[in-house]
Image (cartoon, helix red, strand yellow):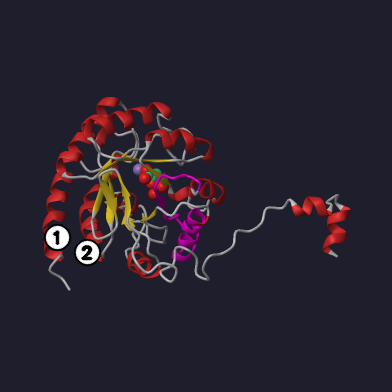
Amino acid sequence: MLLTTLNSIGHTNGALAAIPSVPVKKSPHGMVSRNYQKEDTVIRFGNTQIGGGSFSVIAGPCSIESVEQLLETAHAVKSSGATILRGGAFKPRTSPYSFQGLGEYGLQLLSLARESTGLPVVTEVMDAVDIPLVEQYADILQVGARNSQNFSLLKKIGLSRKPVILKRGLMTTVEEFLNSAEYILASGNTDVILCERGIRTFETSTRNTLDLSAVCVLKERTHLPIIVDPSHAVGLRRFVKPLTRAAMAVGADGVMVEVHCSPETALCDGDQSLTPEDFSHLMKDLGIMSAFMSKLS
Ligand code: PEP
Ligand code: MN
């Protein structure tokens, strides 16, 4: 019956043979699963690592705006102890009239900040056509929440040899999130860092709802490192510090925090960006907490 239908719309057996085959599943629970790999994945690049007991702090502006803005912020976060610099050059904005990012020029500025501070850098890839370009400048590629289930992008990111931060989609369950990561691993890239960045709920008092229980659930189900982005989860600067502390307390492998040298003039996400001073206080708290946590059973 199916063959008759295919023949009637002009498909031959030869055309059918050209349909790409489904990759062989390596484990009944997927390569992301703890059943597939018991020990935690540790992602090493340059002089740093994510996972394996370290707590990584990724910090920087939402968007790269200018050489002055980026360098001032980058040096500030570095001097407070951030281990990786973030900054967006391709921005997924809700409105087409909002600042869309500086594109390749932004990437060039990011690479300047990388040279100037020695910090590895992470930046978002929005479109698969930009992967080769972004790979030239970034140490880590980021897949944003809105692309978390863009399966064709995930398959192509899986062909890259750069580590990937995969953000949880606004409306994705933990199971769906793991399936998105599986797409990347199944295409050959096993260096995936999961990022819980808040999900949409009925609650409107914060930008999203930070799902910290997902960190515990993910730690049980997968060997991949898990970081938390409190900035996009909560959307309000004054709540970023307590939620960052909570992320460390719950056992995340790190955080990604937005910091801007002048949040009131930021072109994107100023309300949720910490000042360099806020960030320095936060880093001191994390130092105290991590010493305390090392004594916990
Ligand atoms: C970002 O990190 O700049 C960003 C746009 O985050 P998200 O994709 O989580 O909204
Ligand atoms: Mn942002």
Q: Is residue 10 magenta?
A: no
The answer to whether mark 1 is within 8 Å of ligand 1 is: no
Residue at screen point 39% across, 34% down: 89
Where does the N terminus fall, quadrant-wise? bottom right
> According to the image, label 2 marks what residue?
249
Q: Is residue 197 above or below residue 82?
A: below
Residue at screen point 63% across, 59% down: 22
* Lateral position of residue 221 relative to residue 242, left or right: right
Which stretch is magenta? 159-185
Residue 289: numbered disc: 1
* Badge 1 vs badge 2, beta-carbon distance below 8 Å: yes
Amino acid type indicated by mark 2: Ala
Where does the C terminus fall, quadrant-wise? bottom left
Residue at screen point 38% across, 31% down: 107
Of 177 and 212, which appears nearest the observer? 177
Q: Is residue 234 above or below residue 128?
A: below
